[in-house]
Amino acid sequence: MPKLSTAVLKEKKSAIEDAARELFIKQGFHATSMRDISKHAEVSLGNFYNYFPTKEAIFESIINGYLQIIDEKLRHIFMKIDEPLEPENLRKMGEMVGDLVNQHSDFWLLMYIDVLEFQNQHFRKMFEGLADKFRTIFADKFVDASDRGDLRTGVDGAVVFTAAYMQFFNYFLVEKLFGGNQHLGLNDGQAIDCLTKIFAYGVLSEEKISKFKTPASP
Amino acid sequence: MPKLSTAVLKEKKSAIEDAARELFIKQGFHATSMRDISKHAEVSLGNFYNYFPTKEAIFESIINGYLQIIDEKLRHIFMKIDEPLEPENLRKMGEMVGDLVNQHSDFWLLMYIDVLEFQNQHFRKMFEGLADKFRTIFADKFVDASDRGDLRTGVDGAVVFTAAYMQFFNYFLVEKLFGGNQHLGLNDGQAIDCLTKIFAYGVLSEEKISKFKTPASP
DNA sequence: TAAATAAAAATGAACGTCCGTTTTTTATTG
DNA sequence: CAATAAAAAACGGACGTTCATTTTTATTTA
């Protein structure tokens, strides 16, 4: 038959991708066979190779597609944050990161597959220069906060935000994928509140702080 | 020949384990074949099955052995910390966690294998009730700190310590396994210092804090 | 409009290789 | 010598991929 419309072709291709993604997530890359995929995608084994040249190619295609989706979601999260260091905004970020992890935990399973089998080739970009990326996203907000004297301890605002972001992510990943089972001894809402407090307000008393500060710069 | 001494037997068994662990770490569980292992362990394929009944059995054996080693190392780390919330001790923990991750990154690769292929069956225990575990390890230190008024923001000391612990771990794992490449924009030492400051001293100015505190409890 | 055509899509058997495990054979040693 | 360790061979099955073949269908022709 003559060439199918590119729309139909794309649709079939993405149907195969969907099936493959489900299986990769459920059972890993090596444990998923091409026969599994073709059966689950209701495509003959042979026809599969009209859409993807190799098994690894479909894995890469899945990752790239998913990376775009998650990048978009993350952009959306940061768009909703005007002042990145305001406690209420940190809390909001915690909630949104939690939703993202819980709704797309499979994405991070793919990342672990990538770490194990491809030295995280495809996901590295998510972490490289992360603090700088936030500095760009939030333009001058961090220097502004510093100029206003908001940052009591003279710490880099972008680093604080990155640390908070990573902390939230890690918290929810541990809960969702690693069997954390309320590893902080708190439910998710309490954990977010508590972590926000830590990052925004700090912990030790002024007295304790000055006690440990003085010997450093007498 | 008559039965080998149990000492010799144990030695051979652990030699096989060592070889298998190296390969599992380097290339994952499914990607490592029994022939790989037997060749690398300089044991015939058939003889392998005199020591381990299945491929999965050796994986479990490796994990359990490694879990003990890491547990021991962690115990050693916490033993060196008398006052868990003192900034200098947090910093020390950061350094020790960094060493642990860098010297035994393979252990966490095994954990990711476990997450992907065994729903983290074997590693769950590392996270379950983590904050409570620290509460036990450090006995009354957290309530003492609270009673002394060390904790300015009234946050649970055990949660703070757990959060710091997780943050350090995650930081070094991202650097070592995920291609972070100084993702905070700092070298390891600076990162430890900065994170310690955040957890101990907090970030926002007193003014900012009271500003965000007052509407919560007027 | 309906039949013919040609090119692309879909198929599933077959290929060679490697898998984890079992069985058989050989070597070793108290 | 006999018991056991070690090695080798063999097993059935599953793997990713290829390919000759069949089916499908947009287009052309009548």
Image (tube, coloured by chain):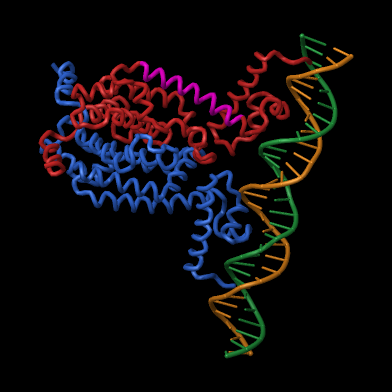
Chain colours: A blue, B red, C green, D orange
Q: Quadrant of the N terminus of chain B?
A: top right
Q: Is residue B109 visible?
A: no
Nearer to the camera, D16 or B155: B155
Q: Where is residue B178, by image quadrant?
A: top left
Provide residue A57's location: percent of width, then percent of height.
52, 51
Q: x%, y% of residue B206?
A: 12, 33
Q: Which secondary structure is most common in the magenta stretch?
A: helix
Counting labels gives: 0
Q: Residue at x 37, y 20 (%)?
A: B78
Q: Give the camera-side residue of A60 and C24.
A: C24
- Magenta stretch bounds: B58-79
In the rendered view, tell whether residue C7 sits above or below residue A164: below
The C terminus of chain B is located in which quarter?
Answer: top left
**Image spot of residue B194 (x, y percent):** 25, 29
Image x and y of residue A21, in percent: 50, 52
Q: Is residue A7 left or right of residue A205?
A: right
User: Is residue B200 inside the magenta stretch?
Assistant: no
Residue A182 visible to the viewer: yes
For the residue pair A150 and A134, the one nearer the viewer reads as A150
Q: Residue at x 55, y 59 (%)?
A: A51
Give the quarter of the image for residue A39: bottom right
Whether residue B180 is situated above or below residue B135 in the rendered picture: below
Q: Is residue A120 above or below residue A40?
A: above
Q: Is residue B77 magenta?
A: yes
Q: Is residue A45 above or below residue B80?
A: below
Which image quadrant is residue A216 in? Answer: top left
Task: Please give the name of the residue rendered at 57% of the width and 36% of the height, measured from the top-left corner.
Answer: B29
